[in-house]
Image: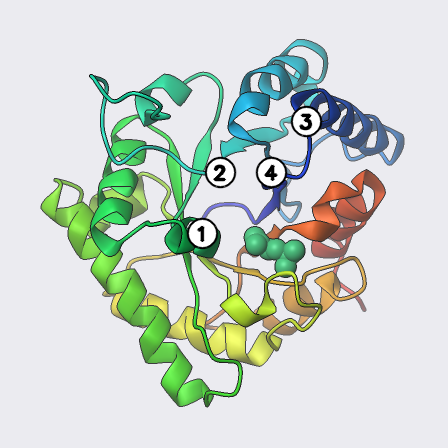
């Protein structure tokens, strides 16, 4: 099992210049707080996901000035196509050396046209480029019972990974390539009403059950903030199954101090 991940999804909220300044503040606060080794046993890896135009300046700032912090960069999406005549596409192979991972199938990308088929091909291209695919899945109805939500989300996972398998990347190879699944209920995104840790664990169990015994890390995302971050980690830590491997944070990740508070909450078990 890989280290826990805290992923900051900045979406399209900032200009590239603001993203560089945000990344600099985050790195400085991490240094102030002595979080110079995110890669310890229990400490999460911090991953910043700037906009497509912010990827290069943010990655070069971190590589040039803060290489010792091991803060990673992720793209928020990549193309379902490979290198070639695809005007306007962000091809996974071209992210090598800039990003370490790619968020794929976020509900905001699904609403803009992503399908199981395109998501499967994006996953395959990301893995082929040596990037960690972060596959987002999520249910649409808050009032649905857990028993109904889990199959909806597991179905998304199974369809996307079946499409990746058809593109040459069966699940066992994807897991070896670092596949991570982020459970993000649509109704919890940006709503200040997160799912409960118990529901997230039920989904994680479902995904892990569908993974035929493969160790598939599952993150939770949706209205995570500094006030509730610890609950995810505390309630699921040490569980035999269904444990969460980190958090995907949207709105709260725009505030550098709050983001570092979330990293801290995920690092230090409450006693
Ligand atoms: P949120 O967004 O933390 O603002 O709810 C999460 C996401 O969409 O990734």
N-terminal-most mark, 2 or 1: 2
Q: Is residue 184 above or below residue 174?
A: below
Q: Nearer the viewer, mark 1 or mark 4?
A: 4
Disc 2 packing (10 Å; few <14; some 14–19; many ≥20): many
| Coordinates of residue 18 in the picture (x, y in percent) | 74, 26
Whether the residues at callouts 4 and 2 have beta carbons within 8 Å, the answer is no
Q: Report x, y in % for residue 45.
A: 60, 40
Disc 3 versus disc 1: nearer the observer: 3
Tell me the distance, in whole angstroms, between the alpha carbons under discs 1 and 4: 13 Å
Kind of element beneath mark 2: loop
Residue 218, image x and y in percent?
A: 46, 59
Residue 15: mark in rendering? 3
Label 1, on which residue? 106
Q: Which one is in front, 89 or 28?
A: 89
The disc, 1 or 4, on the residue closer to the chain's N-terminal end is: 4
For marks 4 and 2 on the same chain, the one whose residue lies earlier in the sequence: 4
Q: Quadrant of the C terminus?
A: bottom right
**Cβ atoms under marks 3 and 4 closer than 8 Å:** no
Front tag of 3 and 2:
3
Q: Would you call the spot at circle 4 few (<14 residues within 10 Å), some (14-19), or many (20 or more)?
A: few
Q: Which residue is mark 2?
A: 76
Residue contact between numbered discs 2 and 1, judged by CB atoms under 8 Å: yes
Number of marks in picture: 4
Numbered disc 4: secondary structure: loop
The CA span between labels 2 and 1 is: 8 Å
Disc 1 C-beta below 8 A from ligand 1: yes
Q: Which residue is mark 4?
A: 12
The answer to whether the residue labelled 1 contacts the one labelled 4, judged by CB atoms less than 8 Å apart, is: no
């Amino acid at each position: 099992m890989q280290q826990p991940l805290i992923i900051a999804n900045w979406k399209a909220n900032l200009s590239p210049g603001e993203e560089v300044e945000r990344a600099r503040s985050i790195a400085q606060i991490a240094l102030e707080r002595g979080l110079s080794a995110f890669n310890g046993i229990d400490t999460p890896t911090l991953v910043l996901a700037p906009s497509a135009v912010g990827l290069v300046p943010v990655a070069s700032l971190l590589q040039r000035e803060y290489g010792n912090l091991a803060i990673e960069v992720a793209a928020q999406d990549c193309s379902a196509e490979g290198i070639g005549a695809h005007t306007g596409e962000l091809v996974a192979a071209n992210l090598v050396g800039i990003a370490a991972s790619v968020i794929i199938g976020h509900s905001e990308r699904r609403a803009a046209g992503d399908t199981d088929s395109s998501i499967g091909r994006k996953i395959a291209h990301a893995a082929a480029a040596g990037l960690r695919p972060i596959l987002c899945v999520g249910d649409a109805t808050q009032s649905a019972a857990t028993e109904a939500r889990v199959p909806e989300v597991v179905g998304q996972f199974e369809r996307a990974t079946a499409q990746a398998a058809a593109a040459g990347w069966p699940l066992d190879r994807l897991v070896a390539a670092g596949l991570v699944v982020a459970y993000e209920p649509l109704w919890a995104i940006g709503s200040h009403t997160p799912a409960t840790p118990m529901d997230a664990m039920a989904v994680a169990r479902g995904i892990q059950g569908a993974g035929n015994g493969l160790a598939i890390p599952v993150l939770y995302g949706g209205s995570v903030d500094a006030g509730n971050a610890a609950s995810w980690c505390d309630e699921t830590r040490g569980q035999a199954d269904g444990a969460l491997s980190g958090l995907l944070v949207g709105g709260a990740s725009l505030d550098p101090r709050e983001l570092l508070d979330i990293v801290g909450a995920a690092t230090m078990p409450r006693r």
